[in-house]
Amino acid sequence: MTRHRTTPDTVHDVLAAIDRLIELVQPAPGLRFIEVGRSPDDTDLIAVVSAWRDAGSARRALTSTDVRLQCWALYAAAIDEPTSFESIVSADPATQTRGSSDLAADTAAVRLGEAAGPDIPRASW
């Protein structure tokens, strides 16, 4: 999921970039769906939500050279925040499914960028 802040001057470029993004990633292996929404409370805020078979499929499609070159207006309007989430609960009107996390068991102790563990201070690198 990515959120994008637009202005009256940029909204048309961002929406055109979203259309191009959809054209480029729709045939990508692993795409389950892509959906675009606009906040009724803050009309300058647009969200792009996509679901993928796995993280690798999403990364390959969304960071391809064509996407980067042709969808620059979308990236320029992106809000700097986490964009990937794993599904741990899925529900529809009839069922609810709880999945297990794919995160490593030591995720809470070892942060991104730490080589071996929490006992190795970053300053010693």
Image (cartoon, grey):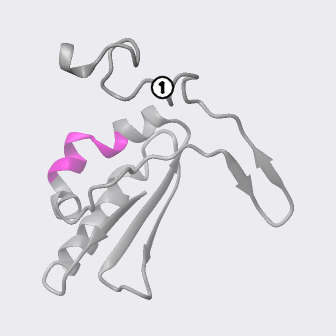
Of residues 71 and 88, which is closer to you in this image?
88
- Identify the residue under disc 1: 109
Q: Picture coordinates of residue 96 (x, y %)?
A: 81, 54
Q: Picture coordinates of residue 98 (x, y %)?
A: 76, 44
In the displayed structure, 4 sits above or below 42; it is above
Q: Main secondary structure of the magenta part?
A: helix
Magenta region includes residue 63: yes
Query: Viewed as shown, does residue 3 lie left or right of 76?
Result: right
In the displayed structure, 106 sits above or below 67; it is above
Magenta stretch, residue numbers: 61-69
Label 1 neighbour load within 10 Å: few <14, some 14-19, many 20+: few
Q: Quadrant of the N terminus?
A: bottom left
In the displayed structure, 86 sits above or below 94; it is above
Of residues 112 and 39, which is closer to you in this image?
112
Quarter of the image holding residue 105? top right
Please report the residue visible at 77 percent of the width from the left and 62 percent of the height from the top: 92
Please report the residue visible at 43 percent of the width from the left and 24 percent of the height from the top: 110
Query: Viewed as shown, does residue 73 lie left or right of 86?
Result: left
Q: Picture coordinates of residue 80 (x, y %)?
A: 27, 56
Look at the image and tell me whether residue 19 can be seen: no
Quarter of the image holding residue 28? top left
